[in-house]
Image: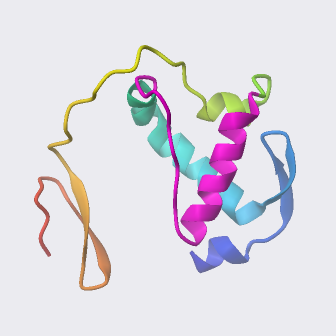
Amino acid sequence: EVATATTQTPVPYCGFEGVHLGYRDELDRMTRALLPRLKPKLSKCRRVMCTGHSMGGSICEIFAACANSKRADDPDFRRQSWIRETAQALPEITEGATSLAAGAEVRCADPPCFA
């Protein structure tokens, strides 16, 4: 997180000027890695809320600003946008999880996760 947070050069993102380079790059990595798997689920949501702390909060703000900008011609917007479908309840997640143990993040394949 320190390397990301200290890369402070202002850059454009999703039509906005002066976006923090480190946070923009981290959001870009996340959208490329995670959104292909999340878009089918997001499309069934009535609304999406984003929250985070520290770097996560900053990344969330950039994501939300872009998602709400409706700049359909912007490549950043297109990469992180999804097509809304009819809202529906999604099945409970029963595989994989993340838990915090002894101050460190632990990932496991099958919940419940224990350190």
Residue extending furthest toward the right = 17
Query: Is residue 31 toward the left or the right of residue 25 in the image?
Result: left
Where's residue 68, x and y in %? 69, 36
Q: Residue at x 70, y 55 (%)?
A: 24
Tell me, what colour scheme is on the image?
Answer: rainbow
Residue extending furthest toward the bottom = 102
Where's residue 75, x and y in %? 74, 31
Quadrant of the image occupied by residue 64: top right
Q: Is residue 47 covered in magenta? A: yes
Quadrant of the image occupied by residue 71: top right
Q: Report the magenta residues as a range.
A: 43-70
Q: Nearer the viewer, residue 24 or 87?
A: 87
Q: Is residue 64 covered in magenta? A: yes
The quarter of the picture where the C terminus appears is bottom left
Q: Is residue 114 above or below residue 88?
A: below
Q: Nearer the viewer, residue 1 or 43?
A: 43
Q: Is residue 89 above or below residue 66?
A: above
Where's residue 4, x and y in %? 64, 70
Where's residue 53, x and y in %? 53, 69
Q: Residue at x 50, y 38 (%)?
A: 48
